């Protein structure tokens, strides 16, 4: 079925979906995951315009992260732009795949904006993978304000689709692909994922 015709219900795992499996070499709960790519808008330390999210592993296939809303992230005066909040959710959800040692891209992402999020607010993000069906990975996230147990301001459901490293080599711009390939850490990380148990 083409992407344009795919029904909205595609965020619900099918009946024969299975539980996600945490990779034995995933970082221990509480440990930082580290950036998956230095220039990533969501997590890259070398990206001056980025969100600089630092996800930490949780129990099972779950992560937490904090995102501080800056003045550059405004939509309405003094309030976070919804697209930026969705980016923070996307990044947090995407980092779950690294706990399973799976390379995946966002297929579908649906955000509920529950409360406005003012500039300077720390958004406490929490995400968990709930099910896996073939290449499809079903995950959900919430973002709370006023503390890790504060009220929910945003939440999202997503389906990520597993891809091979060739996805990036085929579609990415040569300049950046070559630079990433010249980065020994990046190559080691990607190669480790290709020998899944
Ligand atoms: C050494 C080399 C250096 C490389 C360095 C690489 C480092 C990078 C590492 C890690 C990167 C992680 C990046 C995280 C960043 C944050 C997350 C993002 O924002 S990702 C960007 C936004 N997303 C996209 O750009 C996807 C664009 N879309 C696509 O490329 C394709 O549509 C893709 C791959 C998603 C699917 O295409 P198909 O041809 O491979 O697969 P089909 O056969 O269509 O689908 C497979 C299954 O998935 C379902 N599916 C596909 N798209 C879906 C959708 N949109 N919603 C729901 N289900 C979907 C289908 O129904 C099918 O399911 P059934 O197996 O039949 O049950």
Image: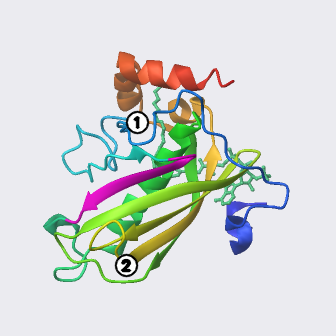
Q: Is residue 13 left or right of residue 66?
A: right
**Residue at which label 2 appears:** 151
> Would you say the beta carbon of the disc 1 residue lies within 8 angstroms of ligand 1?
yes
Figure disc tally: 2
Residue 67 within the segment the image draws in magenta? yes
- Within the image, what quadrant is residue 135 found in? top right
Viewer-nearest residue: 45 or 21: 21
Q: Is residue 109 visible?
A: no
Q: Secondary structure at mark 2?
A: loop
Seen at 37% across and 47% down, the residue is 55
- Residue that lies at the very extreme toward the right in this rendered image: 16
Magenta residues span: 59-69
Q: Residues within 10 Å of mark 1 (few under 14, many from 20)?
A: some
Viewer-nearest residue: 126 or 73: 126
- Within the image, what quadrant is residue 75 found in? bottom left
Q: Is residue 39 left or right of residue 186?
A: left
């Amino acid at each position: 079925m083409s992407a344009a015709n795919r029904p909205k219900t595609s965020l619900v795992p099918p009946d024969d979906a299975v539980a996600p499996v945490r990779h034995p070499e995933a970082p221990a709960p509480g440990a930082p995951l580290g950036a998956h790519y230095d220039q990533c808008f969501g997590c890259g330390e070398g990206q001056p315009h980025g969100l600089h999210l630092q996800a930490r592993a949780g129990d099972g296939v779950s992560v937490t992260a904090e995102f501080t809303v800056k003045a550059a992230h405004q939509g309405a005066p003094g309030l976070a732009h919804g697209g930026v909040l969705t980016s923070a959710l996307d990044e947090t959800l995407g980092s779950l795949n690294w706990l399973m040692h799976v390379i995946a891209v966002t297929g579908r992402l649906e955000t509920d904006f529950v409360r406005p999020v003012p500039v300077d607010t720390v958004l406490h993000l929490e995400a968990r993978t709930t099910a896996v069906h073939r290449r499809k990975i079903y995950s959900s996230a919430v973002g709370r304000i006023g503390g890790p147990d504060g009220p929910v301001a945003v939440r999202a459901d997503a389906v990520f689709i597993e891809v091979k490293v060739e996805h990036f080599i085929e579609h990415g711009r040569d300049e950046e692909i070559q630079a990433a390939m010249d980065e020994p850490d990046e190559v080691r990380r990607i190669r480790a994922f290709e020998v899944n148990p």
